[in-house]
Amino acid sequence: MSYSESVGRKMKELREQKGLSIAQLAENCKLSEEVIADIENAKNIPNIAVLAEMARGLNVRPETFVDDGEGCGPVLTRSGEGVVSTNYANGHVSHPVFASYVDLAAGKPGSHMEPFVLDLKASGEEAPMSQHEGEEMIYVLEGDVDVVYGKQSYSLKKGDSLYYDSVIPHSVTTKSAAKVLAVIYTPIN
């Protein structure tokens, strides 16, 4: 069973055990019904911020979704083997025009951090803002990126980094292709 299938199955089991509909869970988690259904059907892999929201909505520990007694050690991700995951910004699936996400530690139970490589694409559309508990750090590997953080803007070049509280609305965009190493920290209650 894949990581996304395991998470989806456990989420659906917990939701049904608690007698919640998808709509009720979506409301509890402040996520869209589409996001909940896609996760349950293993169509998308949730990031740690979404796992934390789902855990709060179901009143369980986030590790519950991935805790199968395995995977307690380190997670080695070889070049080209990262898990492509879907980004969720404010409870909705982010438009794939902007970026693709490669999770570098998929399946690590009980983690507070989520490291991933973000391949940004140029787009004439306004980027969706994201806002969630925790902190983020981005490091530009290739290209130039623009970060909107609240009412401030930052232009970052290769080798630059930015560390910030992710509870403030933020977005990362580029005028041309760029690649960013990002780490999201989410406090887990």
Image (cartoon, rainbow, N blue to C red):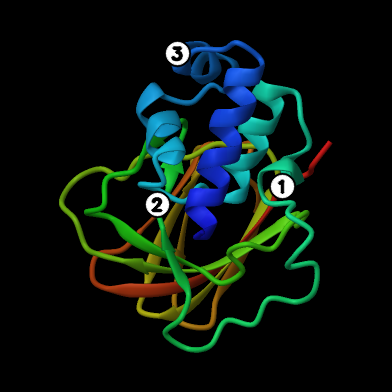
Which comes sooner in the sequence, label 1 or label 2?
2
Q: Eyeballing the image, is 24 above or below 67?
A: above
Which is in the foreground here, disc 1 or disc 3? 3
Image coordinates of residue 3 in percent, x first then y, are: 54, 58
Disc ID at residue 23: 3
Q: Nearer the viewer, residue 32 or 117?
A: 32
Q: Eyeballing the image, is 189 above or below 86?
A: above
Q: Residue at x 25, y 65 (%)?
A: 121
Is residue 150 in sight in this rendering?
no
- Could you give the CA–CA distance between mark 1 and mark 2, rounded to whole angstroms? 17 Å
Give the amino acid type for the residue marked by disc 2 in the picture: Thr
Image coordinates of residue 135 in percent, x first then y, are: 69, 50
The residue carrying mark 2 is 86
Q: Residue at x 48, y 50 (%)?
A: 5
Count residues near mark 1 (Cα–Cα under 10 Å), then give few for <14, some for 14-19, many for 20+.
many
Q: Answer whether labels 1 and 3 touch (C-beta < 8 Å).
A: no
**Which SS class for mark 3?**
helix
Count residues near mark 3 (Cα–Cα under 10 Å), then give few for <14, some for 14-19, many for 20+.
some
**Which SS class for mark 2?**
loop
For the C terminus, the quadrant is top right
The residue carrying mark 1 is 186
95 vs 115, left or right, is left
- Could you give the CA–CA distance between mark 1 and mark 3, rounded to whole angstroms? 25 Å
Determine the residue located farthest toward the right in the rendered image.
Answer: 189
Count residues near mark 2 (Cα–Cα under 10 Å), then give few for <14, some for 14-19, many for 20+.
many
Q: Nearer the viewer, residue 138 or 75?
A: 75
Is residue 100 in sight in this rendering?
yes
110 vs 108, left or right, is right
